[in-house]
Image (cartoon, grey):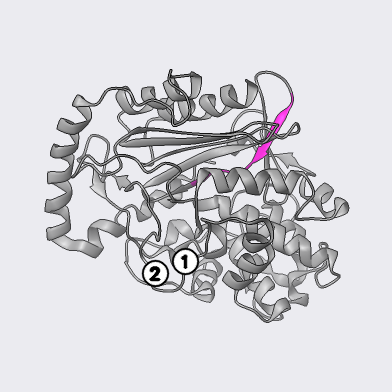
Amino acid sequence: MREQAWQRFRSYGRQRGGPRRAASAAAAVAAGVIVMSALAPPATSTAARPDTVQQGLNTLVHSDGVPAALASVKGREGRALTYTAGVGDLATGSKVPRDGQLRIGSNTKMFTAVIVLQLVSEGKIGLDAPIETYLPGLVRGEGIDGRHITVRQLLQHTSGLPNYVPYLGDDVRHYKPLGLLDIALQHKADFIPGTKWKYSNTNYVLAGLIIQKVTGHPFAEEVDQRIVKRIGLRHTYFPAPGDLTIREAHPKGYYQDSAGAPLRDGTELDPSWGWAAGQMISTNSDLNRFSTALLAGRLLPAPQLAQMRTTVPAEYFGSGARYGLGLVSKPLSCGGVYWGHGGSTTGYETRGGVTEGGRAVNVAVTIQPANKATMKRVETLVDKALCR
């Protein structure tokens, strides 16, 4: 889930704002330290006394130094709890919005995979068809041939296609999907398709392009019609080209140029470099609603859901993790597994998923933690909340 390569774009906010933004960010850090030191540990939005989840968020703020931490828990019976800790804006010390919107990074891949599998169920895409069928002549490079890469291999990260993200550099501009693909195709294949597993955002850019080609509609429109409106995700959307903001109430997201450096505001950025691999905005509770609906069969027919849950080892996501088609399974300390994905993008880190029994949890922090111990605490908190 931790996508280290995406951190190369933490500089978006700094470069977009220039010296003026850098100065205000430095002032924000100073103000935030004063404000946060005066805060008592926040109480949950629905209970008088802190519980395990609240205590976990408090630790992330007061011990790990994340500006804000948010969580949403949906019980098997449908009851939802939301939690916050820290401050939503270091410059003003404002409260963290309850269930505020966040950039959800690679959680977007789950949405992309669902749409592809819906189109499979409609007979419009063949899961084991070569991508050449839908994008003729487009995918060619050193050791790369779209005639020998299947749709399934894109969704499962077994295509061997190189990840474009490490080659983006720090240039701040709008990216088109074909431009991202062009960057990837300048580099040789990582391996022969189907022989290994390696995480690559290029796979999901191509999946998005296939969706557009098959449906004749923009990717964002398909997300909205096929998922967002279908299951009533009220705070989830795919940002329009040029939209650098987050529409609804949200905590600001921060980044550091290096370990120990001042926190800088990276909330507003052009997310086009993620596109169908990582551009979406949502909330913890909407992610819970999505994952619950997915596992309950409300988004996919049983055969396609079974394909989505057919996994291969993916230790990249942690010990015992396995990757399906845009979906990760991770073992629970209390037995069994949970299903989700996770996302990492400038200013925000999200982790969570849903159990077979329907309990769903998502936790977010408003910085990409460089400390592995901090990320371990986030993931442990998800596990504890799902095992309650």
Residue wearing tag 2: 243
Left or right: residue 176 versus residue 191 is: left
Q: What's the magenta region? A: 336-343
Placement of 10 over or under 356, stated as above or below: below
Residue 351 magenta: no
- What's the CA distance linking mark 1 and mark 2? 6 Å
The residue depicted at 84 percent of the width and 55 percent of the height is 301
Q: Is residue 158 visible?
A: no
Placement of 292 over or under 146, stated as above or below: above
The residue depicted at 34 percent of the width and 36 percent of the height is 68
Residue wearing tag 1: 239
Viewer-closest of 138 and 191: 138
Query: 10 Å neighbourhood of mark 2: few (<14), some, or many (≥20)?
Result: some
Where in the figure is residue 289, as x and y percent of width and height?
Answer: 63, 46
Q: Quadrant of the C terminus?
A: top right
Q: Quadrant of the N terminus?
A: top right
Where in the figure is residue 234, as x and y percent of width and height?
Answer: 55, 56
Q: Main secondary structure of the magenta part?
A: strand
Residue type of the residue flagged with mark 2: Asp
Q: Is residue 307 visible?
A: yes
Query: 10 Å neighbourhood of mark 1: few (<14), some, or many (≥20)?
Result: some
Residue type of the residue flagged with mark 1: Pro
- The numbered disc on residue 386 is none
Viewer-closest of 75 and 255: 75
The residue depicted at 42 percent of the width and 47 percent of the height is 100
Count the numbered circles shown: 2
Left or right: residue 188 versus residue 365 is: right
Badges 1 and 2: C-beta atoms under 8 Å apart? yes
Placement of 107 over or under 136, stated as above or below: above
Left or right: residue 35 versus residue 233 is: left
Where in the figure is residue 61, as x and y percent of width and height?
Answer: 33, 28
| Secondary structure beneath label 2 | loop
